Image: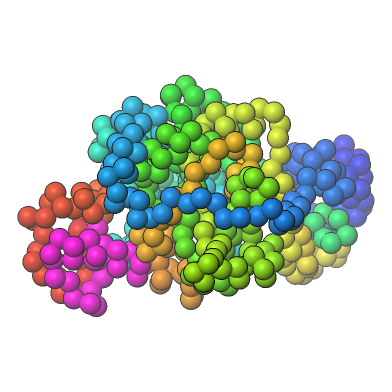
Amino acid sequence: MLEKKLRRLGQDHIAKLLESGAGFVSRSEIEKDLEEINVSLFQELMEGRHLYQEPALVRVKPVPVVPASFSASPEAGRYRAHGEDLLRKGRVAALVVAGGQGSRLGIDAPKGVVEVTPVSGKSLFQLHAEKVLALSKKYGRAVPLFVMTSRANDADTRAFFARHSFFGLDPEEVFFFVQGMLPSITPEGRLVLSRGGGLFMNPDGHGGTLAALRRSGCLDAMRAKGIEEIFYFQVDNPLVAMCDPLFIGLHNLKGARMSSKVVRKRDFDEKVGVIAEVDGKTRVVEYSDMSDDMRYAVDERGNMLYWAGNGAIHMIRRDFVESLTGSGLRLPFHKAEKGIPALDSQGNPVEIPGIKFETFIFDALPMAEKTATLEVLRDREFAPVKNRTGEDSLETSRAMQSELHKSWLKDLGVEVSGRSLIEISPLAALEKEDLAARAQSLPAKIEKDMYIE
Ligand code: UTP
């Protein structure tokens, strides 16, 4: 029975509230939440097991990075052609993680519905879906799209896709799967009563992708479809170069199990994790884990040594996910302190200090025998929407999208006035080269905002 289970978990305070019949506590919600909780994992976390340990940064060095300039080299053509071949053969799936809470943005909806493009105001989901559609048309083979949601936004996300007829994608090629949840706790290890009368839970982080792929049956679906490679990206980056053939080809031909795109850090103090080699393994060293020696290290020419900022875009082999999840391997849990909107024992709304546990996808990197790392230019591929204002906000992201598309037009000889906003639909051109094919139909001069579709 419920109270017994709570007591077994050392959560007498919630059991007592249930027994007292307090109106603000919902038995059914608590029951539902407890069902989500993996009891043995929870107990082990309470005992301090499976927690992320800061790596001892003794044997640390930069990872070899394929520089952004490589993409223009003749050798890159071989890798790109291989990536294109895999796309043509239907070996690649796109996977977007969209289960996050978007708390910095402060919206009460899935982040993917945020209208992000500079002129037509397309949502993130529409933009990503159109890129996938354009790819499928370009390579004559459907690229399946896997969308990870969380309990809180799964229904809204599915409804959004359905309401918009899947943005032209074949619904049979879109797979939603739900990540796991973990309870947040107080610093004393007590479960927290949420404002809705259940337990305060949080999604288990983007690292939850791996287990959720297996649990949901999506990994089996991928195998059945002949998918070998997963292109992983985050929902909040409208500039993502969807299933970039160069990245796919490089990763696959180099025999990597998991690969990453990196962007050059803006400066020593940018709060982003860097990809480095620690004890012979590739891993992301988080900003907060870096010693000053590492953060400010320079090479013989005085340039930043650890500049390879994690771009949160990965290629992951399907069989790597199978081997990781098949052996019950756990990614380490990171603890984060945060304010939690809760109810006190009298049912009054309070904000209390709490702890949430999350796993991160990049913690799988050190488990891959082989990895590849490719540098990409921030202004071409990385404009995440994280904050309401300032850096990495909607405003900066829209401006970056417009600047990129403007540069494509300028390279094709179109004169574009400085103030105008430009947006090119992925269905018109996924990359600059696609636009070149229709250069004849472009105006010679653009003086106002323009959406090219
Ligand atoms: P962030 O770490 O930026 O988190 O997620 P967030 O939820 O979007 O925003 P904040 O931190 O609450 O403000 C990066 C990507 O990982 C996904 C997010 O949806 C986003 O695409 N994510 C994050 C998940 O899918 N699940 C999670 O549990 C966490």
Picture coordinates of residue 137 (x, y %)?
25, 37
Q: Where is residue 261 in the image (x, y as percent from the top left)?
A: 46, 51
Residue 228 lies left or right of residue 205; in this view the side is left
Q: Which of 436 and 391 is in front in this view?
A: 436
Please indicate whether residue 418 sits to the left or right of residue 105 in the image: left
Name the residue nearer the viewer: 282 or 445: 282
Residue visible at 24% across and 78% down? 419
Q: Position of residue 434 (x, y in %)?
A: 20, 49
Instruction: Name the residue located 60 percent from the left edge and 47 percent from the top edge.
Output: 282
User: What sort of colour scheme is used for the picture?
Assistant: rainbow
Residue 31 shows up from this direction: no
- The answer to which quarter of the image holds residue 104 is bottom right
**For this view, does 170 lie left or right of residue 9?**
left
Please say whether residue 252 is visible from this viewpoint. yes
Query: Height in image: 431 above or below 350?
Result: above
Is residue 401 part of the magenta span, yes or no?
yes
Against 391, is 281 above or below?
above
Given the current orientation, which residue lies at the most extreme top position?
A: 224
Identified at 54% across, 66% down, the residue is 299
402 part of magenta stretch: yes
Please report the residue visible at 82 percent of the width from the left and 60 percent of the height from the top: 186
Q: Give the range drawn in magenta.
A: 399-424
> Which part of the image, by quadrant, shows the C terminus?
bottom left
Number of numbered markers = 0
Q: Quadrant of residue 400?
A: bottom left
Q: Residue furthest front?
A: 300
